[in-house]
Image (cartoon, rainbow, N blue to C red):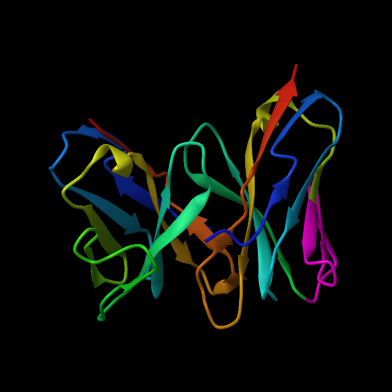
Amino acid sequence: SQQGEEDPQALSIQEGENATMNCSYKTSINNLQWYRQNSGRGLVHLILIRSNEREKHSGRLRVTLDTSKKSSSLLITASRAADTASYFCATTSGSARQLTFGSGTQLTVLP
Amino acid sequence: SAVISQKPSRDICQRGTSLTIQCQVDSQVTMMFWYRQQPGQSLTLIATANQGSEATYESGFVIDKFPISRPNLTFSTLTVSNMSPEDSSIYLCSVERSRQGDTQYFGPGTRLTVL
């Protein structure tokens, strides 16, 4: 079953703008991971943030985690047309090792 | 990261037939996972495959429909049996690299279309 929701479901922006995607989840987590998927292909791992972390950066990506609100956000700065993809958050909880995915955000970056 | 390959990358199959999907990893891993992504949807876990034991299936998935093999620490197969058009999906395997925390890496997926 889905852990939670992502919003927006779809986001369209101009190249150079920033894109923010949000993820909410329902249970306590060990960590939260963000993935990118291009055109129904495999998932590319972007970043992992642990439950005791509040913010992480990787290149143009910035992820925040608010465990009190059970939510995370992914910010992509200075977006490029190549960033066009679906973005998913996924969590692990308790002793389970498998990922539970959010519903995903389809990002379109217009040139 | 992990190098994961899947075969086939895509296939078109007839109703009632079966397809076996292979997942190969470039190094030994303890846990491998199989996910399904139906058209326009997110990913749902089918089962966890551990070497030397039977796979653990999630609610809604059964061994008769999705038999899994895990003969060693670098390889697994998922069979989609007695297929129907509702099985048309992308099937992905993933592995966890514990030395890199709990990061999970995914294969490129197998796009299955059932006519």
- Left or right of A1, for residue A12: right
Horizontally, residue B9 falls left or right of residue B36, namely: left
Decide: is A104 above or below B26. above
- Quarter-of-image position of residue B75: bottom left
Quadrant in the picture for residue B90: top left
| B62 displayed left or right of B17 | right
Give me the residue at 47% from left, 38% from top.
A41
Tell me the residue at 55%/83% (across/down): A95
Residue situated in front as seen by the camera: A42 or B43: B43
Residue A53 image offset from top left, x and y in percent: 81, 71
Q: Pick the residue in front: B27 or A3.
A: A3
User: Which residues are the magenta region?
Assistant: A52-73
Total residue callouts: 0
Q: Which residue, as the protein is rendered here, is positioned at the far top?
A: A111
In what quadrant of the picture does the C terminus of chain A appear? top right
Residue nearest the observer in this picture, B47 or B8: B47
Q: Is residue A57 magenta?
A: yes
Residue B66 on image: x %, y %: 25, 59
Q: Is residue A21 above or below residue A84?
A: below
What is the x, y in percent for residue A108? Answer: 70, 27
Query: Magenta stretch: residue B9 in it?
Result: no
From the top left corner, tell me how far across and down residue B88 is, in percent: 32, 39
Left/right of residue A10 with respect to residue B80 in the rendered view: right
Q: Residue furthest left?
A: B17
At a point 61% along the width and 62% down the height, the residue shown is A3
In this orientation, which residue lies closer to the viewer: B88 or B30? B88
